[in-house]
Image (spheres, rainbow, N blue to C red):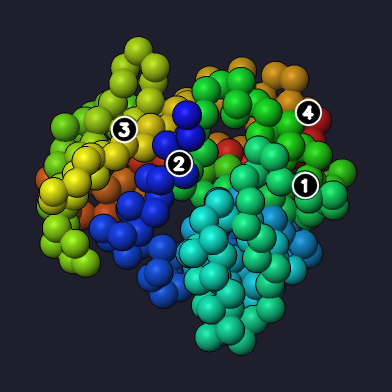
Amino acid sequence: MAHWAHSFYELQQQLTGCYSAPVHPCHYECVQQIQEAVPAGSLLELGAGGGQFAVAAARVFQVTALELRPSGTAHTLKLAAEHSVTLEAVTGDFYTVPLPRAFDVVCYWDGFGIDDDAGQQHLLRRVHDWLTPTGTAFIEVFSPWYWSKYAGYSRNWTSPQSSRQTYGFDADGNRMTDTYAPEGQPAQTQTLRCYSPADFRSLLNGTGLTLTKARPGGHYDPDAQVWTPAVPLSECMTWTAVLKRS
């Protein structure tokens, strides 16, 4: 059976247009945060989506953007041309794609946790192998406390297509769920394993990577519809694991 990721993200794009959006100021802010640790060099982005971050990063880094969906790769190249930057866009599965070179930075935003722990460890071992000896990885991790708190929240999308989105939380598996139910079509769900920093340190055993920093992200209050970009770790929606080779 095909993994849910092979169909979910195309549906998400169809219903929300999120992967064909323009580059946002938050993408440039993310690049600046990376530059605090690594000012320049080569950068591999895993799960590049529509290429928004990759294009922002390409102003400073030599970027390789790896994306599962061919439509995402095509949009990355289109966006790069519009912004007059050069990058490499590769279509492939990051669990299997051959990339026989090392990078100063490896990053993965808004998607880590699609597999079970063993699958995540396999990916982290690949991240280790893709890093230069002094390289740094940035992995955005979903926090269990946020997703358990807001499980059951639901909202409607009307453009480009009518659908209903619902947050959920699998307490036994410690996984957030995000379900899209388009009008007249079957619902589809993404499910991402959530980790606290302590859980993530355990996950790193045997991967050759060390967690050097847990950087809190922001908080979205779905009831008030307010986004707060910087909150304590105990309140954040996601946090970024900053990793070095052991």
Circle nearer the N terminus (3, 4): 3
Q: Which residue is mark 1?
A: 98
Q: Dot 1: what SS?
A: loop
Q: Amino acid at mark 3?
A: Thr
Mark 4 = which residue? Answer: 208
Q: Earlier in the sequence, mark 2 or mark 3?
A: 2
Callout 4 amino acid: Gly
Secondary element type, mark 4? loop
Tell me: 241 left or right of 208.
Answer: left
Asked whether residue 143 appears in the rendered view, the answer is no
Task: Kindly tell me whether residue 227 is visible in this rendering.
Answer: yes
Residue bearing the label numbered 2: 5
Q: Which quarter shows the C terminus?
A: top right
Q: Cα distance, mark 2 to mark 3? A: 13 Å
Residue 141 lies, in percent from the top left, at 49, 37
Judged from this view, the residue extending furthest toward the top is: 172
Asked if 132 appears above or below 188 in the picture, the reply is below
Q: Which is in the foreground here, disc 3 or disc 4?
A: 3
Residue receiving disc 3:
177
Label 3–label 4 contact, CB within 8 A? no
Q: Quadrant of residue 165?
A: top left
- Find residue 233 and report its horizontal and vertical position in percent: 42, 36
Q: Real-space Cα distance between discs 3 and 1? A: 30 Å
Dot 2 alpha-carbon crowd within 10 angstroms: few under 14, some 14 to 19, many 20 or more: some
* Disc 4 and disc 1 in contact, CB within 8 angstroms: no
Real-space Cα distance between discs 4 and 1?
19 Å
Discs 2/4, front:
2
Label 3 packing within 10 angstroms: few (<14), some (14-19), many (20+): some
Which residue shows up at 77% across the image and 62% down it?
Answer: 42
Closer to the camera in the image, 140 or 8: 8
Q: Is 89 positioned to the left or the right of 228 in the image? A: right
Q: Whole-percent x and y of residue 170?
A: 31, 21
